[in-house]
Image (cartoon, rainbow, N blue to C red):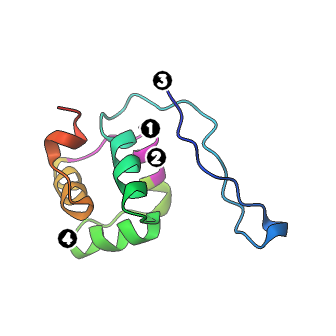
């Protein structure tokens, strides 16, 4: 499995200490890597995606989204549809079809 190349922003450089994902992706969903890919392609932060999901009636926490993107947590059908809408991609694309 591949990892995603997140940029490390060091706190002493004025950043917030974001870390690179060091663990391999999990196996609990098929869409996590695609969610991350689509979110980053749109220049969205996780918190911005969470706000869009909330408008669709899907209330996730930051840790829950992180686990979802890392494929360490299952995704419900309602979450899948809301993610596709928020990211302007199809459910089929998220599923890798």
> How far apart, in angstroms, are the residues tagged by discs 2 and 3?
16 Å
Secondary element type, mark 4:
loop
Q: Earlier in the sequence, mark 2 or mark 3?
A: 3
Residues under numbered marks 2 and 1 in contact, where contact means CB atoms less than 8 Å apart? yes
Q: Is residue 20 above or below residue 18?
A: above
Q: Is residue 91 above or below residue 54?
A: above
Q: Earlier in the sequence, mark 2 or mark 1?
A: 2
Q: Which residue is mark 2?
A: 67
Mark number displayed over residue 56: 4
Q: Position of residue 35 (x, y in %)?
A: 34, 49
Between 22 and 88, the one nearer to me in the picture: 88
What's the residue at 21%, 50% (across, down)?
80
Q: Position of residue 24 (x, y in %)?
A: 54, 30
Between circles 2 and 3, the one closer to the viewer is 3
Between circles 1 and 3, the one closer to the viewer is 3
What's the residue at 46%, 66% (across, down)?
45
Q: Is residue 58 left or right of residue 40?
A: left
Q: Earlier in the sequence, mark 1 or mark 3?
A: 3
Residues under numbered marks 4 and 1 in contact, where contact means CB atoms less than 8 Å apart? no
Q: Is residue 22 above or below residue 12?
A: above
Q: Position of residue 87 (x, y in %)?
A: 27, 59
Q: Is residue 51 above or below residue 68?
A: below
> How far apart, in angstroms, are the residues tagged by discs 2 and 1?
5 Å
Mark number displayed over residue 72: 1
Q: Earlier in the sequence, mark 2 or mark 4?
A: 4
Disc 4 residue crowd, few under 14, some 14–19, many 20+, Cα 10 Å: some
Q: Which residue is mark 3?
A: 1
Image quadrant in which you'd find residue 26: top left
- Residue span colored magenta: 66-76
> How far apart, in angstroms, are the residues tagged by discs 4 and 1?
23 Å
What's the residue at 43%, 54% (across, down)?
64
């Amino acid at each position: 499995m591949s990892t995603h190349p997140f940029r490390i922003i060091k706190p002493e450089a004025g950043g917030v200490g974001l870390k690179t994902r060091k663990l391999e992706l999990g196996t609990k969903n098929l869409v996590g890597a695609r969610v991350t890919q689509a979110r980053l392609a749109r220049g969205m932060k996780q918190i911005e995606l969470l706000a869009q999901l909330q408008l669709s009636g899907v209330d996730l926490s930051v840790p829950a989204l992180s686990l979802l993107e890392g494929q360490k947590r299952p995704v419900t059908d309602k979450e899948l549809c809301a993610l596709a809408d928020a990211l302007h991609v199809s459910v089929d694309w998220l599923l890798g079809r």
